[in-house]
């Protein structure tokens, strides 16, 4: 199956700093990537949809100026958490979708990035 | 909008069969998917129902009834490694929401010896 990687797997930072998380599709071209946040024992909450070459589409309630998303190529999307605070501590997961057509394209998930803000 | 409900926890013994239900309220969707997630890991795709009926993939089967706004995941011959969280998810209509997934709250399955 298709492989999606994320880097870093874990990051600890001080409050007020910015953190960049990378999501790469290793063996396929991802026209669309998705960013999710997951708190312990909770569901995956979709934050934004990232389309290559265009601006990301953010879900209601997600601050686009705080969570900057860039999808510069068909294999790389980045999420930058700006001015991170302890409440931003969470598990951030990306997924990638191959192709544009059809009602269903399986999403392949990255291994996630555990962010801890002190 | 979309709203999916699942039981929060299910416990079963090795070798047994367990059914995880997913009821939904949605304005329309392309299909119902199921994902498995082990603690701290990435969700992995299990099954997809685009049409009503039963889809079988090895020990896992999934069912969808649009008229009843209901679906389920059936796990047979349970193994200890099946202990994980299971999420149902819907794909909203592509016309305005680009193939994204909306997840249910998840069901934590514990398989006991």
Image: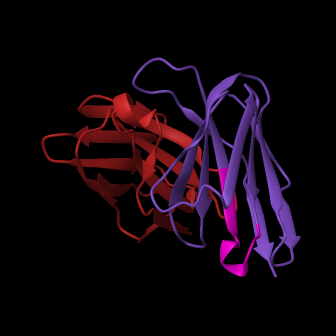
Chain colours: A purple, B red
Q: Kindly identify the residue that appears in the image at 51 percent across and 40 percent down.
A: B46
Q: Give residue A98's quadrant in the image.
A: top right
Toward the left, the furthest residue is: B67
- Counting from the top left corner in percent of width and height, residue B2 is at 31, 52
- Residue A88 part of the magenta-drawn span: yes
- Residue A56 part of the magenta-drawn span: no
Front residue (pair A79, A102):
A79
B67 to A89, vertically: above or below: above
B27 to B3, vertically: above or below: above
Image-based side of A101 in relation to B24, left or right: right
Toward the front, the furthest residue is: A65
- Counting from the top left corner in percent of width and height, residue B83 is at 57, 62
Q: Kindly identify the residue that appears in the image at 86 percent across and 77 percent down.
A: A14
- Counting from the top left corner in percent of width and height, residue B71 is at 28, 47
Q: Kindly identify the residue that appears in the image at 82 percent across and 82 percent down.
A: A118
- Counting from the top left corner in percent of width and height, residue A101 is at 47, 17
Image-based side of B70 in relation to B7, left or right: left
B67 to B80, vertically: above or below: above
**Quarter of the rendering occupied by the C terminus of chain B:** bottom right
Magenta residues, start to end: A83-93
Front residue (pair A88, B76):
A88
Image-based side of B23 in relation to A34, left or right: left
Q: Kindly identify the residue that appears in the image at 41 percent across and 35 percent down.
A: B48
Image-based side of A118 in relation to A107, left or right: right
Total labels drawn: 0
């Amino acid at each position: 199956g298709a492989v999606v990687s994320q880097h870093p797997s874990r990051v600890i930072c001080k409050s007020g700093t910015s953190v960049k998380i990378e999501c790469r599709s290793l063996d396929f071209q991802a026209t669309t990537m998705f960013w999710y946040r997951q708190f312990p024992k909770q569901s995956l909450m979709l934050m934004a949809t990232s389309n290559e070459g265009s601006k990301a589409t953010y879900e209601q309630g997600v601050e686009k100026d705080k969570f900057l998303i860039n999808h510069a190529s068909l294999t790389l999307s980045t999420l930058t958490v700006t001015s991170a605070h302890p409440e931003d501590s969470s598990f951030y997961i990306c997924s990638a979708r191959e192709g544009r057509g059809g009602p269903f394209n399986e999403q392949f998930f990255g291994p996630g990035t555990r962010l801890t803000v002190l | 909008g979309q709203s999916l409900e699942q039981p929060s926890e299910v416990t079963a013994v090795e070798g047994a069969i367990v059914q995880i239900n997913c009821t939904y309220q949605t304005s329309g969707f392309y299909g119902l998917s199921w994902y498995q997630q082990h603690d701290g890991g990435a969700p992995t795709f299990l099954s997809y129902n685009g049409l009503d009926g039963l889809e079988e993939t090895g020990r896992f089967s999934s069912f969808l009834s649009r008229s009843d706004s209901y679906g389920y995941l059936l796990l047979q011959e349970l193994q200890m490694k099946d202990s994980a969280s299971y999420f149902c998810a819907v794909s909203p209509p592509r016309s305005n929401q680009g193939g994204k997934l909306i997840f249910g709250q998840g069901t934590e399955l514990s398989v006991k010896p």
